[in-house]
Image (cartoon, rainbow, N blue to C red):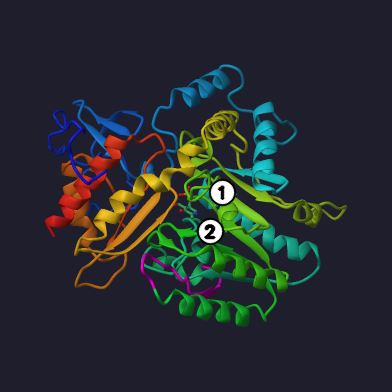
Amino acid sequence: MGIQNKKFSTSNMTANPRKDEWHPNIWPPFTQISKSNPPQRIVKANGALLEREDGRTIIDAISSWWVTLHGHSNPYIAKAIYEQAIQLEQVIFADFTQPQAEHLAERLSKATGLQKLFFSDNGSTAVEVALKLALQWWFNKGESRCQIIAFEGAYHGDTFGAMSVGERNLFNEPFEELLFPVKRIPWPATWWGDEKVDNRENNALKRLEHLLEHPTAAVILEPLIQGAGGMAMVRPEFLQKVQLLTRQSKALLIADEVMVGFGRSGSLFASKRASISPDLMSLSKGLTGGFLPMGVTMATKEIFNAFIGSNPSQTFWHGHSFTANPLGCAAANASLDLLEKDPKSFQNFESRHLPHLKELSQHPKVKKIRLTGTIAAFDLQTDDKDGYLNIAGKAVKKYALEQNVFIRPLGNVVYLLPPLCINDTQLEHCYYVLKAALDTL
Ligand SMILES: Cc1ncc(COP(=O)(O)O)c(C=O)c1O
């Protein structure tokens, strides 16, 4: 299978970006208006395709910020949400429970091996909950441990706790003084043909060992793949060693699987693929198949038990208005049905990327190719410094959009993270367009 453009029809896909003004009432996320074009309006979506008002389609090659799992408007999930909506759309989740939430908790508990599930609203809050649970676990045990260890390059969300454990950078600079202190170790990312990974891993482990000499509440990481940090992938062996050191120090291990969960890593959970068993796990994005916002934090029974007691301060005083929203739970249960029915859809995805990536690896503008599960990435070879502010990816993004493929490079990191339903022709078209974009650089 080569990088060609034989089968994918572009007859209805001529480039003509909408030139409307910005909407007068909308404040868009992650956008500097003075340097961006107004967004295109999408009115419909199906499978891997987004549809504009005039009917022209775009391949959503990054699953709409990594959430769309099986495909847009998946009829099975849509039906489950509809049926739930006319049965029970919402009920307060204190004093009451409901079957969809119970069913989901049972299934995720079985799938992750973590017996207890705490509901929240999105990825950031799923991380906040994990951090608060870890810190309060030590508080409840009567041992003062506040040190948190996180990785360089990490991204865990945009609320204050999540920002604190994320890499300090441009995005959180205005709030820096209010973020809680976190100790950091390097993330020894690797790629095809990397010969120095052992050294980098050893350095990171040495630093971790040193930091763990101080009583530590928790170590938080994105298993196998740092997402916003540049699709930076590490070896499972490294994570196993991190787990060993963390356990020896009695600190808790938090796996932020907000991006990598639900098959993105080629396994249902990246922790499983890496053979690690965290104490706490944050999940969101693909949880509902990408249909509705919802987050959950999974915890061991041991952690849960430390919150049971007669002293009110032992309680986890945390909850959100939409906790365990039945529609979100129905979507999540339907999404799990689909994953269970066709595990090959994510288990075999790597082999679908592979031939294309091999071909791209010959391109002079490509370096540091990496692949884990459904996520394929490489860095653009440029004269500027690597990183988020490197503008090389912008030209590739613009070119790809003109060819009706939507990507959002992270600086000079270009990646594909498509929904599982993308067909071979569409995937081939993505790679064809990427190669053509690279030829223009
Ligand atoms: C690993 C990780 N954690 C947390 C988050 C935050 O999720 P949300 O944007 O739903 O708050 C993200 C978002 O991209 C993420 O990739």
Q: Residue at x 26, y 41 (%)?
A: 428
Q: Amino acid at mark 1?
A: Phe
Q: Dot 2 corresponds to which residue?
A: 223
Seen in the image, is 237 located left or right of residue 48? right
In the picture, which quadrant includes the C terminus?
bottom left
Residue depicted at x 18% and y 30%: 9
Q: Position of residue 66 (x, y in %)?
A: 41, 45
Q: Nearer the viewer, residue 236 or 226?
A: 236
Residue 99: percent from the left, percent from the top?
A: 69, 27
Q: Are marks 1 and 2 in contact (CB under 8 Å)?
A: yes
- Residue at far right of view: 310
Queried whether the magenta region covers residue 141, the answer comes back as no
- Give the secondary structure at mark 1: loop
Asked where in the image residue 50 lies, by quadrant, the reply is top left
Nearest to the observer: residue 91 or residue 51: 51
Q: Label 2 is placed on what type of residue?
A: Pro
Q: Is residue 191 magenta?
A: yes
Relative to residue 133, is residue 4 drawn left or right?
left
Label whose residue precedes the other's in the sequence (1 or 2): 2
Crowding near the residue tagged with mark 1, few <14, some 14–19, many ≥20 C-alpha atoms within 10 Å: many
Q: Which mark is residue 269?
A: 1
Within 8 Å: ligand 1 and the Cβ of disc 2?
no
Measure how far apart labels 1 and 2 are at the Cα level. 9 Å
User: Does residue 274 appear anywhere in the picture?
Assistant: yes
Query: Is 389 on the left-hand or right-hand side of 337?
Result: left
Quadrant where the image shows the N terminus: top left
- Between 275 and 128, the one lying in front of the other is 275
Q: x, y percentage for residue 41?
A: 25, 34
Q: Which residues are magenta?
A: 179-194
